[in-house]
Image (cartoon, rainbow, N blue to C red):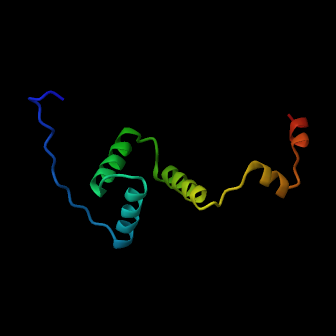
Amino acid sequence: MAESESPPEKTTVNIRMTETFLEDVDATWEEYGFNSRSEFIRTVLRDALKHPEFNRADLKAMLTSEAEIRDGRTHSSADIKSDYDLDQSTSDSNE
């Protein structure tokens, strides 16, 4: 940005949300290393505008997957094969 240019003026926008939702927002922005709640919300809104192909169900599925990974509730392919008595040679011969 050139010295003569000033940053765009910002406008304050007020939104209402439940305390529980705000706690989730606060935990999320801090967890992902944003400098502030406002920075996080601006980024989320910018992403929503730039990538409208993601709908609420897609976002929920991604967030659920991330939570499962973080909480260790995922399984390796070897675990699944073992649980269902599948071995690699059986799946290779079917291809």
In this rendered view, identify the residue nearer to me: 46 or 27: 27
Q: Position of residue 68 (x, y in %)?
A: 60, 59
Write the residue at 85% across / 34% down: 95
Q: Is residue 93 left or right of residue 4?
A: right
- Residue 52, compared with residue 13, is above or below; it is above
Q: Is residue 44 left or right of residue 88?
A: left
Q: Is residue 84 left or right of residue 15?
A: right
- Residue 7, compared with residue 62, is above or below; it is above
Write the residue at 38% across / 45% down: 48
Q: Position of residue 81 (x, y in %)?
A: 82, 51
Write the residue at 25% across / 62% down: 15
Write the residue at 35% across / 42% down: 49
Query: For residue 72, what is the image quadrant?
Result: bottom right
- Residue 8, compared with residue 26, is above or below; it is above
In this rendered view, identify the residue nearer to me: 14 or 56: 14
Query: For residue 7, what is the image quadrant?
Result: top left
The quadrant in which the N terminus is found is top left
Q: Is residue 69 left or right of residue 18?
A: right
Q: Position of residue 13 (x, y in %)?
A: 20, 56
